[in-house]
Amino acid sequence: MRRLHLLLFAMLALLFISCSSDDNFVEELDTIGDYTYGLFVLNEGNFGAGNTEVSFIDNMFTGVTNNIFGSANAGNSLGDTAQSIAMYEDYAFVVVNNSHKIVVVDRHSFAFIDVIEEGIDSPRYMTVVNGKGYVTNWGDPNDASDDFVAVIDLESMTVEQAISVEFGPEKLVSKDGFVYVVHKGGYSQNNKLSVIDANSNSVTEVVEVGDVPNSLQLVGNDLWVLSEGNPSYAVDGETDGKLVQIDLGSLQVAKEFDFVGTSPSHLEFDQGKLYYTISTTDWETYETESNIYAMELTSTELPSESVFFTDKTFYGAAIKDGMYFGGDAKDYASNGSVYVYDLVSGEQLHEFSVGISPSGFFFTE
Amino acid sequence: MKEYSEGYTQKVLSDSILSRSNGTFTSLLESNSLIYFKENGLGMVSSPSFRGTNASQTAVLWNGVPINSMFTGQTDFNTILTGSIDELTIRSGSGSVPFGSGAIGGSILLDNLPKFNQENRHQVKLGYGSFDTYNGQIRSLISSKNAYLDVSLEGMQSENDYDYPKSSKRNVDAAFYHYSLGLSAGWRKNNHRLYFHSNWYEGKRDFSGTLHAPARDGYRDYNTRNLLQWETYLGRWTSSLKLAHLYEQYRYYANKHGANYSFGKSNTWWTDYSLAYRITSEMKLTGILQYNNVDGKGSDVEDANRDTGAAILMFNHHLTKNWSYGLHLRQEFLNGFTNPFLFAFDTKYQVTPHYNIHLNVAKNYRVPTFNDLYWKGGGNENIDPEKSVQFELGNTWEKKNYGASAAVYYIHSTDMIKWVPRGSLWYPMNISEAKNYGVELEAHYSYNWQEHRLRADVAYGYTKAEDQDLKKQLIYVPYHKYNASLTYQYKDWNASYQVLFNGEMYTSSDNLNRHKEYQTHQLAIEYQFTLEQLQGVAGVRVKNLYDTYYENLPSRPMPGRHFNLFINFNF
């Protein structure tokens, strides 16, 4: 393993980080390490049990390494119920929801660098714009008025601003200095997309999308937002899923697609097509099935036939380079599995045993 | 019901043990039984695993009335205060015929006893302990030949801000208090007895955090229980009519400092008419009719209402002086479930004056809870009661200064209700099956010499509880558990030393993740004194003597060494 020492970074860090006694930063960062090429699988663990962990699958699929945070950090726990990972330069930021913190690690080795706790409250997802981290936060998940996007100075690893936003901010993407945030609505429901100008750090526009938006993709100058619809116990009643295409120039909804009686999830974009997954349960036999659909960007209606299906349901899912990655959480109380499928034939290519409740995939490149 | 329990394992904790307990109900039972408690930190939510069964498979009855929550099907053992109770019975294994739903792993009976024609007595208990813990009780009994009134007020509060042993973290923002008012009264005239029992409870807890998650949520609960009982004795006939009302209310605060909460509340009207006929001095037959109506609602449960009727027949027979048996039957109706027909057979044989064997075989059940049936976005109104067939074989050897007992049991539970993920939602279904079997061993020895009294007790349990789908041990069921104590008394002084051990257990259903075993020690020293009319006992208790770091549940550390001072007066 080749190690390059980032002496300059260390010097900068010494200059800019106010170094109190409990500041724990690593003075050198690797640029290549065990975890440079491949994919991180986030294992959410059990809420309250403090057993969230990260697994790594290399890009040649030679195998899986589980508990990479604990292994790199003397067996320490990553925390309670991690929600997502963001990567920027040589850092990986693990957003740990129920520990209300962001753990900063060296993305090549997963060695601990820092932790950001001050100004973070029920964090969900993070993205980086102009060298600043933007993190969605729910605050009290039942309170619709305390939600915010925290802006993190990645030099000092501190929260420098909180932007108050609509209820339940979830996933976010950025383009040309704007941050686009969908709002699921915490423990309740919401149907909004917020646009934040990263120069002024203010919300410039709020657009209505489908109920409970769970994923979004940026394709060219369009934002595609997939919503799963309200659950049956929602105050406003159950609604169906919806996919909307938003033109980022006008922020107008260019097209919208209504699902009928189904609840889609995991919107992905790969090799020119959009993909989403619909899981269904047969209430006679209680058997479940997941269908993966592909859709052309120019299509005027939703595809009627799925690309492939499986009898598994996936807690986390992602698509990359013609492969579908599904995280099967099984009973959510034991180690889960990751299945990799060929996106054309539906053939299962690989299976890996990972940690408890695999909920997300984060590719290193 | 205790007279129908010859062929069962049961342990009775008397008033004197109860009155010395000033900790939580969980710690009292941990010291006196082999029940494993999952406790979310000291004083927090505590759920039992009796013989490896789940928390809703332990029935709790207050003066014969089932009090498990209508929403969760279980009792939180840190919300029970025992100061107004006269007798606590821990009955292992089957109990659904007499006690109803959930009496599978075992039953906990909290009873007030009749107190006619006793001396008036008054009791004051005060306690102070580590983490700013205060507890106190005042209890008065006024008794005459044909009437009595027993009133008790007790409370406990704690900052509960203990340091996690060998860690820089503390159990912050986890204060709790609870208090309870108990009232018990009786009148008798000729062959009639009239009793009234009442209990009011209120508790507020700021829930503990974990090593990795800050303490954010909180809980308040408020319960009332009232029971009126009229007994009549007419020759060979005994008639008993009971009418009870239970009110249960909880509020869960996701943010304990905020104003938002979710809640549940229920009202239960419970009636029981029992008619017993003593056929001969060796044979007794009892018929019971029960009816109850439960009405509940909550922020996560639609308006829920359930009527249940039950008919019970119990026959007990002493075949010979040394051999007895009982056959008990129960059928429920009205509630809309496919109700199983329940039976229980028990027998006891006194082989020698010092040795007996007992056996029981029974079918038990547990009804779905309101959460199982009506939870918004998940409740399944098509589920049925869980069933379990079980047996126990035990033998006891008892001499003057020593004794020992051993029991083996087997519990086969089917149609167990389990919440399973289906797509993005979870639903309860009758799909789980478990087989539990185990061994319980107990021995005691006492030795008296002049004014020295020595007593040793030891109990050990081996529990195998296997999920039949996975063929794996159920999570949070330790294979091994034991407790042992040594008590030495000299004149007015009394010292006791106790060891509790919980074996390793699994935290994931594939048995790949484990939770470490732990052992804790406790030392108590007491001094009894008399000051004119006043009789008292004062003492100190040191818990977790060796400051052991242990977790009852993952990342929830329990306190290290802590102290408790107490003084009780009787006059």
Image (spheres, coloured by chain):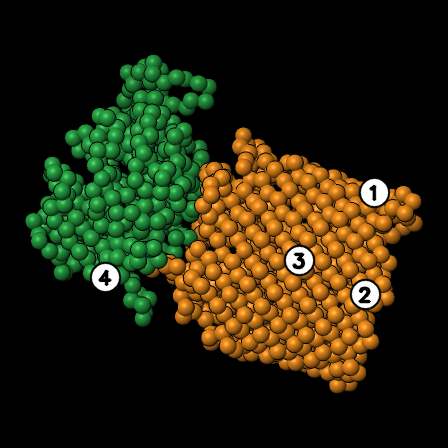
Number of numbered discs on residues: 4
Could you tell me the amino acid type at mark 4? Gly
Chain on which label 2 sits: B
The green-coloured chain is labelled A
For label 1, the residue is B527
Camera-side mark, 1 or 4 = 4
Chain on which label 3 sits: B
Q: Secondary structure at mark 3?
A: strand
Could you tell me the amino acid type at mark 2? Ala
For label 3, the residue is B199
What residue is drawn where x is 75% and y is 77%? Answer: B232
- Give how far apart the Cα atoms at labels 3 and 1 are: 31 Å
What residue is drawn where x is 43% and y is 56%? Answer: B300
Q: Secondary structure at mark 4?
A: loop
- Give how far apart the Cα atoms at labels 2 and 1 are: 34 Å
Q: Secondary structure at mark 2?
A: strand
Residue A164 x/y as whole percent = 32, 34
Residue B406: image tag: none
Residue A261: image tag: 4
Camera-side mark, 3 or 1 = 3
Between residue A228 and residue B291, name the one nearer to us: B291
**Residue B476 can be seen, yes or no:** yes
Compared with residue A183, is residue B75 higher up or lower down, i.e. above or below? below
Residue B39 x/y as whole percent = 56, 48
The orange-coloured chain is labelled B
Could you tell me the amino acid type at mark 1? Tyr
Sooner in the amino-acid sequence: mark 2 or mark 3: 2
